[in-house]
Amino acid sequence: MSQLGRFPFGKIVRPLTQCDRARKELFVLGVYASAVHARWLDPGGIELAKALAVASEPYIFWRGDGAATIIGQIPIPAGAGCLVPAAASFNGPSGIALDECFLAPLRRTREHAWLSDLVPHSCVNPQQQVAIKRAYMPRMQEWSLPQPSVPSVPSPLATLARQDEIAAELIESKARILVLLGDEPIRCFSARWYPSARRLSDFGCDDDSYGRLHEVTVAGTQVALLPLAHPRQVARLGRSSARWYDLHKRWIANQSGGLL
């Protein structure tokens, strides 16, 4: 577990797996796990970083609950200031989007879904790299801060071995619908068995084609692909596409009958 790396302030990067292994109706595949984000203040109360990733999510597609407790358990060296929860928009927005914009329109909850990611742990993205380099690294020696070693986003996101692991999870889940959240789960997983589509737009990007089911056999098991936009798009989390937001909004309006 420790081989994955450590966050700023020393917490171990942990892998996340589906805890409830009971049979599910949906298998939801995302990109990579997020993290618990903290606002870092110096001893005088001046903000050093507004959202620094400091711990692994407590569960897959975390909703942001318990952030203050998690952050409060992180040891801070004397004189290094304090950590408080970052703004709500940094903790759990994808998990909230999953529940409200994907599962709820299908009249389903997490009890009906098996959740997975291409990369089953947190990764340091370019924004976090900038924050660590600017705010954390220059103060490491002075404040006796531990060396961070959060893994970078891998390329490719999922090796063949990782694809096999996800396929094994899919088979174990017995889910009949595989929900793909955005381009990367398509390119790095489903395209292996459905090679005619390597991105979301390959499935179509109009009201008649978006959010439709596509039958495929994955590792010998027949499932229906449900390719949808990434939570960033449908919940407008940062930079996003108005086209995918509008298509998904209309798809939600058409789900009055529940599970498609």
Image (spheres, rainbow, N blue to C red):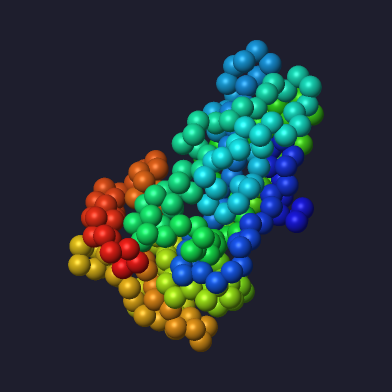
Q: Position of residue 221 (x, y in %)?
A: 49, 84
Q: Position of residue 156 (x, y in %)?
A: 54, 65
Is the C terminus in the top left, top right, bottom left or bottom right quadrant?
bottom left
> Foreground residue, 172 or 2?
172
Q: Identify the residue at horizontal 40%, vertical 81% (top origin).
A: 216
Q: Quadrant of residue 159?
A: bottom right
Q: Quadrant of residue 176?
A: bottom left
Q: Identify the residue at horizontal 28%, vertical 64% (top origin).
A: 257
Q: Position of residue 26 (x, y in %)?
A: 46, 67
Q: Position of residue 115 (x, y in %)?
A: 53, 61
Position of 210 with respect to 37 (left or right) is left
Position of 119 with respect to 221 (left or right) is right
Residue sticking out furthest to the top: 44
Q: Identify the residue at horizontal 34%, vertical 76% (top origin).
A: 214
Is the N terminus in the top left, top right, bottom left or bottom right quadrant?
bottom right
Residue sticking out furthest to the bottom: 220
Q: Quadrant of residue 213?
A: bottom left
Position of 222 with respect to 255 (left or right) is right
Above or below 204: residue 15: above
Position of 133 with respect to 145 (left or right) is left
